[in-house]
Structures are given as structure tokens and as C-alpha cells.
Amino acid sequence: MTSPPRRRLLRRGVSASLSASLALATVVAGTAAVVVMSAAPAAMAAGVPAPSPIGIAGRGATVPFVEHEAEYAATNGTLIGPNRLYGSLPSEASGRQAVTLDAVGEYVEFTLTKPANAGTGRDAGIDVRVNGSQLKNVPVTSKYGWYYGGYPFNNNPGDTNPHHFYDETRTMFGSTLATGTKVRLQVSSTAQSPTFTIDLADFEQVAAPIGKPAGALDVVADFGADPTGAADSTAKFQAAVAAGQAQNRTVYIPQGNFEIRDHIVVDQVTLAGAGPWYSVLKGRHPTDRSKAVGVYGKYANQGGSSNVTLKDFAIMGDIRERVDNDQVNAIGGALSNSVIDNIWMQHTKCGAWVDGPMNNLTIKNSRILDQTADGVNFHYGVTNSTVTNTFVRNTGDDGLAMWAENIPNVNNKFTFNTVILPILANNIVTYGGKDITISDNVMSDTITNGGGLHIANRYPGVNSGQGTAVSGTHTAARNTLIRAGNNDFNWQFGVGAVWFSGLNEPINNATINITDTEILDSSYAAIHLIEGATNGLNFKNIKIDGAGTYALQIQAPGKASFENVKATNIAQSNKIHNCVGAGFQITQVGSGNSGWYSNPPACTGVWPAPQWTNGGVPGGPVDPGDPTDPPTDPPGDEGNLAQGRPVTATGQAQSYGPGNAVDGDADTYWESTNNAFPQSITVDLGAAKNVDRLVLKLPPAAAWGTRTQTLSVSGSTDNGTYTSLKASAGVTFNPSSANTATVTLPGTATRYVRVTVTGNTGWPAAQLSELEVYAD
């Protein structure tokens, strides 16, 4: 819930099940080809390095895919961004950067770092080529993107205010693609769309279909549902579910694409599929647009549903507009003592909008993509319920929300989720509620009219008179926020990454503990109070690294304590904006605070333009002993960290650019400017890693005779200050050992790895075909 949502750029993607999965996010309409290339092209997008919300140790959802950003891939297209201004194409892209292809033959090419048989992408109209051969042509469409007008928005291209540009497409490849395979997304025609903008591709290895459980009823074999999707199977699914409830038997959905045109109502039954890549429910009523595919519990006024399990299938809707009164969500109703497990929800209005009173619902291990409204909303009277290990991207409103309208929400939890790119509103929010936990999540890239984390007495029905206001203890611990918060197009000033509102009434009867949290590269302020008053705030062990405007933006009274809160890279020289004066009381606890306090604070009539650095490195909570230490990763080899990463060099000869040293192909190489030692090459790993060794290669061909290069290795966490990791020494490359040499390093936390060459016995320049980086 929030003010009018806006749409993001079509995150068109290709998902294929082949030993690899590909997720593409793009903007276009038409078809595209996927090609796997055997050799990497020289071109490289060279996007601005930006922290990724994927794979942060101990936080967020554990996802089955490997994400590849187009801005760091090989391409002959045009890099767009970074830009966070609402309404611009890159503003709705992951990392606020993408690649536009506007001519036949233009491409983005990804190198697989793990085997994959499927992919999901944000793009459109793309040929998929593998190792030089066309694998398939992937149809894409813009019909689920490009919204217009004012809230609640429409699909009328003649209207103003275009937004919600991206959509996602998935495809299976039909076989497994090995590590190192080059998957090229290439424009084959511009007849249906003049441009294609590719945001990212997610590749994964999809497991074999799950077989029918013993004793289960089969919606096809036992009830005649049509797996081809040609016939409406709504009534047959409902009959199967009724029989499963009556006989206490699981209802199995085998492989197929099933046309479902209305709610399947479930109660005291398990509905299980062969997996979300195989068992797909889709459809919408041909004449009554308020009816569409969905699995619903009975509403509370009908007695509600309980003891329901939904698992291992996908609900792929056909919702192209936002009509708030239409119940066209993937999952809805009241579902007490129930579990939603491994459900893929896409192109519905909301992923799961559940209405209480109800108790003890768990949503877990799921994916929620491309919604016109919320990802999940616990709407009034929802208690003891949880969303965990769920990946949410491209919602038209709040990513994960609790709204205690009229009936209290109590003891609910959002934990270990990743919520990215909500178009309108917040990544994660609770409107009212008692004893709420929001912990161990990752929130990234808020688009507009919201922040990353929001706790508020806002929206109808949220007030102390009905017991629905914020109360008890709210715990927000161990969260990471990246590029969160953004401009509100109604207010015309920035909304903070973490923000609080007492619009309906002041927050007076709660303890709100924000602890062990990272706020990285906030688009505007890091912490923000507005509307009414907010009291009972406690910030402890907070790392703020980068804020587009202020560390604190105070527009309402309140009270807050700050303990071990460290801020760096705040755009404004005066770190606090406060026009309420002593109405906001700050208590500093201990001696560990730094970088955010100013007295007197700023109080200006003009809001400053944000300054974005794309900085900040995710890496865990602030260490109370030394919060300035760079973050590190837990033990565990992650493979070659340099492959496909942004790379620069002090010089190059002809076309032998530094990108050749991180392309995974030992036959291509970087060569520096001749007779100009010293020369260096630097790779950005994207986050600090405990780098313990380099593997350096030259082409293995016999023509490359034995040579010794004199080189040293240094590292940095900020690309400013470099420290020595390995003193200068000779490193020998011999064809008998495949021209490969290993350099051992001390395991220091390092983001930028630099190799500096001062001599070469085989050629008067630095030469490397591969710079491989490994961490413990």
C-alpha cells in the first residue's frame, strides 16, 4: 500500500530449462534469439560498479540462480545509466543501469559461471545463441509493462507518465550448458520493436520434475484437466481439490500449462505440483476481467480455510492493469495453519494478498515477480505469520507489507527475503501492528514514493483506538538496504532508506529497535521521520555508507537513541536536516557514533539535488570493536571471482583490451602498451572478498614460449587506497604447465585487485590471457 504505484521498464527475460536457467529483464516487444558463442567478443559494457543485492552472506533469500547484469557483460549495444530519476529507463533497472540494443545483430553476451539449463531475463525479442549456433528464438512482449497515467494507472499508450517498463521472460534451454558457455542474446529483427533494453539474466539449473506422491489424486488422470491449456480446467481442478479434502489425499498437478479462469478455493488440502518450471496455472476469464487464475482460501466471513499446503507449482497470470477491487491475485483469502512453499507468482495483481482474521500462515522458498500491486500483504487480523526465504522483484506497490486495517496484526515476521525494485512504495513495510519482526532481509533499488524499510501509523484503520497502531516491540535487525529510498512525485522531496511516519497518530506506544543494519548508497536520506511523531526509536550498530542527501532527514518530532552508528560518504556537509528543532530529541549512547551528527543541523527551504556514488559494500553488521574494518565473507571457495567483472588497465596494444583477461577464454589476452613499464590491470570484484590466490594465464599455444614477468599484487576496498598483497617478484609462464602460474596471497579483504607488471622476458609489455581471483 502507498500512494499511486508506477510501472517499471519491461524486465523482459528468458528462462530456459536446460542445465541452466536464464532470467532476462528487458524492455521491448517481439522476439529474440539466444546464441551460445565459443569466443568472447572484444566489446564490454563497462557499467559503473554497484553493490549487488544478490548473494549477501547470511542475509536475503537463498536463490537457485546466478544473476548476470547486462551492464557488466560483453556487448556491442549502448550502456544506459546509472540514473535514478523516476520515469527514466535506467531508473527501473537493477543497479540503475542496463544495455539498449537498437539494431539487428546487436547483442549482450553472458559467460556462465555455473552449469544451467534455464534462464529468466528482463528483455524482449531476443535470439538466444550458444557457442555460435542459434538455440532458440524467445518471444517477448511489452503487454505487462509500460503503464501510464495517474494512480492506479492504465495500459493506454496515449496517456502520460509512462513507467513500469520492465518485464521478465523465462525459458528452458533443453539441455545443460556447461560453466564457461557464452550465451548471447541478439536482436534478429527490429520490425516489432525499434529497441530492446536488457537489464539482467538469471541462469539456473532446474531439477527434474517431481513425481506424483504415493496415494495422490491426479488432476489430469483422475479428473480430466487439460495439460495443454486449450480447454478451461477450472471446474476440474475444483473437483479434484474437493475430493482431496474429502478423502484426505494430496492433489497432484503434473507437468502442463493449465487454463484456470477463476479462483480455486482450497481448505484442508494439499495441492502439489511437479515444480514451478513444469506445473503452471494460467488464465483469465475471457469476458469478466475481474476473474482470473488464483488459489484462494475461504474468506473469514465464510469461516476461513485452514491446514492448506500449496507447493511446487507456478501461477502465471494475465493481469495488465491495476483495479484495486478486483480479486485477481495469485493467492488470497484466509489461510490459517497453512504453508505456501516454492510457488512462482508472476503477472497477477498481487502475489499473495491474504485477509484475516487468520493465524499461522508461512510463505517460503517462493518467487514473486512483475506484479501490478503488492508482492505480499498481510491485511488485517493476520497473526503469527511469516514470509521467509522469498525473492520479490518488480512489484507495482509494496514488496512485502503488513496492513493492520481495523483488526490488529500481531507477531508477524518477514525474514531472509530479498526485495528488489518496487515501482511504487516500499521494499518492506508494516502499517501498524504489534510485536513485528523484519530481520535478515535485503532491500534494494526503491523506484519512487517509498523507502526500503518503513514502519508507520499510516493508511485507513491504523490507530490505537482499534488496537491496530504500531505497538509492542518492533525488531528490525540484520537488514541490508542498497540504493533504497527515492523521490516522492507528490511531495517532491526524497524519502529515506529507513523511514517512519505518524500520519494517523503519533507512534507513542512502541519500542522500535533497528540493529546490526547496513544502509548503503541511499538515494536520498539514510534515516527519515515525517508526519506526526515517532518515539521509542533505538538505532544500534548501524553502518551508513553513502547517502544522496543527508544521514538524517527530520520532518517530524520524536525521540531516538543512537549507539555505534557510523556514517561515511554523506553528500551534504551538514549531515542532518531538521526544521523541527528540539522537537526531535537525539540521545547518543557510548562513544562509537561518528559521521552523522551535526549541531546545529541544516534547515533549508530548498531540497538539495541528490549526489549518487553507487558506493557502499555489503558485508554484514557493523563490528562494535572496529566498525571501520572492511567487510569479509565466510569461508568457502566461490569460484573465479574476476570472470565477467569490470576491469581496467593503464594501457593496451591495438585491440588487446583488459576485458580479454576476465572473459574465461585463455586464447584471448590483454597486452599493455609496448615499452611503457610499469603497466597494471585492475579488476573490481563488486564486494570485498578474502582473496587468497590468483591464477594467471597466457595462451597455451606452443607459439607462446616460456617467459618470466616481474609483477606485484595490490588490493583496495575503495579503489582509492591500495595496499601490497604480494611484493614484486618474477612469475614464470611455461607451455609445459599450460602457461599457467599461481600467486598465493594472504587472504586480505579486497574488492579491487591490481596486478602491476614491470618487466617481461618474452615481450616488452605486460601480457595476461586470464586474471583469475579466488577467495577462501
Image: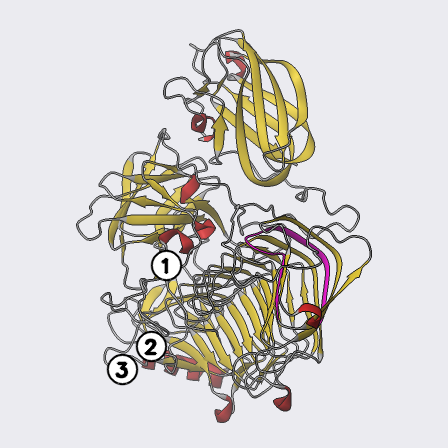
Quarter of the image where the C terminus is located: top right
Would you call the spot at circle 1 few (<14 residues within 10 Å), some (14-19), or many (20 or more)?
some
* Residue labelled with disc 2: 292
Residue type of the residue flagged with mark 2: Ala
Would you call the spot at circle 2 few (<14 residues within 10 Å), some (14-19), or many (20 or more)?
many
Query: Compared to 541, does 360 lie above or below?
Result: below
Q: Does residue 605 appear left or right of residue 141 in this picture?
A: right
Label 3 sits on a secondary structure element that is loop
Q: Earlier in the sequence, mark 2 or mark 1?
A: 1
Residue 79 at what x, y percent from top left? 37, 42
Q: Relative to the observer, which residue lies in front, 562 or 370? A: 562
Q: Does residue 750 appear left or right of residue 450 in this picture?
A: right
Residue 668 at what x, y percent from top left? 41, 23
* Residue labelled with disc 1: 87
For the residues marked 2 and 3, what is the alpha-carbon distance in whole angstroms? 9 Å
* Residue labelled with disc 3: 288
For the residues marked 2 and 1, what is the alpha-carbon distance in whole angstroms? 30 Å
Is the magenta region chiefly helix, strand or loop?
strand
Which of pointers 2 and 1 indicates the residue nearer the eye? 1
Which corner quadrant of the image does residue 233 belong to?
bottom left
Magenta segment boundaries in residue numbering: 536-555
Asked if the residues shown at circle 2 and circle 1 are in contact, with their CB atoms under 8 angstroms apart, the answer is: no
Residue type of the residue flagged with mark 3: Asp
